């Protein structure tokens, strides 16, 4: 793939720079519309919060930001475009659908009763990748899929197959959500079985597991692993993330790992009650302020760190859809 679609227009992969590969400006669980008036009232405050945070990240060297919010999780690509314009940090948005139990599967499950559900999903993904999201003209630059903990439901399998078909048509890479550090291998089975090259896939939230065997079984196939929930202690201890990451870097797998936090900056509807002291490090600056210094102190070279933050995102986009010799 030659160009990357950002919410403010296409760029060359060489322009990406330091990139966080999995963060969210805004998330809304399906049903948030029940509180839509409050959402409208808070809109200006959302924009300001996102701009302030993005400027803080820009000062730390961030150039590009992937927000892989799927269609059904309150995605707002116009907010993304406003924030990108105001901060000159590029944002890449996604097409794709979330896992069955927390997404909005009703529409395509209904459609699938009468016809080819995979084909209909594929059409939507391709339209968002080539023409734009809704009426905005803003094109998605990555395809998002998601699976449940310890299982892939038939609906989720449809989403995976549709993502693979949309990838084959457009060359745009795929990024995934996994739960509890499970089903990454099965995601790869389905996607590569549909003809997607492993180097066009990031198995997201792979740091939800510290199982070396699990990580190696995906790395050996050539996929990228997302160590993309740094600071999210509620789901997995950060010290295990660090230990697993350092072990894999010791084995020279830095070319297949990307770093991020999966932070959520604004919640549509009412925000969840998360006392800040519960997860003080779940901040989009955590990788820059604490994770990297810790890696350096453990003897990880600056070259390996740059590979994860700059080189891997570039290669992931540049070589997606390209058959490697
Ligand atoms: Zn996420």
Image (cartoon, rainbow, N blue to C red):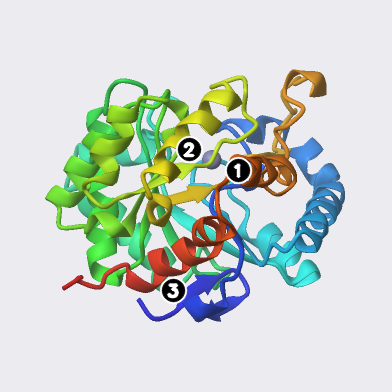
Q: Is residue 5 above or below residue 155?
A: below
Q: How many labels, in total? A: 3
Residues marked 2 and 1 touching at CB (< 8 Å):
yes
For label 2, the residue is 245
Residue at the image point whose x is 77% and y is 27% from the top: 280
Mark 3–mark 2 distance (CA, rounded to whole Å):
38 Å
Viewer-nearest residue: 96 or 298: 298
Q: Secondary structure at mark 3?
A: loop
Q: Which quadrant of the rendered structure holds the N terminus?
A: bottom left
Q: Residue at x 65, y 36 (%)?
A: 33
Give the structural element (helix, strand or loop) at label 1.
helix
User: Closer to the N terminus: mark 2 or mark 1?
Assistant: 2
Front residue of 149/258: it is 258
Secondary element under disc 2, as helix, strand or loop, is helix
Residue 104: in sight, yes or no?
no
Residue 68, horizontal then vertical, whole percent: 51, 50
- Confirm or deny contact between disc 1 and disc 3 (CB under 8 A): no
Residue occupied by mark 1: 295
Question: Which labelled disc corresponds to residue 70?
Answer: none
What whole-number distance in Å separates the C-alpha atoms at marks 2 and 1?
A: 9 Å
Q: Choose top left, top right, bottom left or bottom right for residue 99.
A: top left
At which x and y percent is residue 266?
Answer: 73, 41
As drawn, 107 above or below 22: above
Residue count near mark 1 (Cα–Cα under 10 Å), binned few <14, some 14–19, many ≥20: some
Residue shown at the point (24%, 37%) measured from the top left:
217
**Earlier sequence position, callout 1 versus callout 3:** 3
């Amino acid at each position: 793939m030659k160009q990357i679609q950002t919410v403010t227009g296409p760029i060359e992969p060489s322009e990406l720079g330091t990139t966080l590969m999995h963060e969210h400006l805004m998330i809304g669980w399906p049903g948030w519309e029940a509180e839509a008036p409050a959402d409208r009232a808070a809109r200006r405050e959302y924009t300001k919060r996102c701009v302030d945070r993005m400027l803080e990240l820009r000062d730390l060297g961030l150039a590009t930001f992937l927000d892989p919010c799927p269609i059904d999780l309150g995605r707002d690509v116009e907010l993304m475009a406003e924030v990108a314009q105001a901060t000159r940090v590029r944002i890449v948005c996604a097409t794709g659908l979330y896992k069955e139990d927390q997404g909005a599967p009703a529409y395509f499950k209904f459609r699938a009763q009468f016809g080819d559900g995979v084909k209909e999903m594929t059409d939507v993904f391709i339209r968002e990748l080539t023409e734009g999201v809704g009426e905005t003209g803003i094109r998605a630059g990555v395809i998002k899929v998601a699976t449940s903990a310890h299982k892939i439901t038939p609906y989720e399998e449809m989403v995976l197959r549709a993502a693979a078909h949309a990838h084959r048509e457009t060359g745009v890479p795929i990024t995934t959500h996994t739960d509890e550090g499970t089903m990454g291998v099965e995601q790869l089975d389905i996607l590569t079985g549909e003809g997607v090259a492993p180097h066009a896939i990031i198995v997201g939230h792979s740091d939800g597991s510290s199982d070396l065997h699990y990580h190696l079984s995906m790395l050996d196939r050539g996929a990228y692993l997302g160590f993309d929930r740094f600071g999210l202690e509620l789901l997995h201890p950060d010290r295990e993330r660090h230990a697993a990451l350092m072990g894999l870097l010791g084995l020279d797998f830095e070319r297949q790992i990307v770093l991020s936090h999966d932070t959520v900056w604004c919640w549509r509807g009412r925000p969840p009650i998360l006392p800040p002291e519960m997860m003080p490090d779940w901040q989009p600056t955590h990788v820059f302020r604490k994770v990297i210094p810790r890696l350096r102190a453990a003897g990880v070279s600056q070259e390996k760190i740059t590979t994860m933050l700059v080189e891997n995102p570039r290669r992931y986009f540049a070589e997606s859809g390209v058959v490697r010799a």
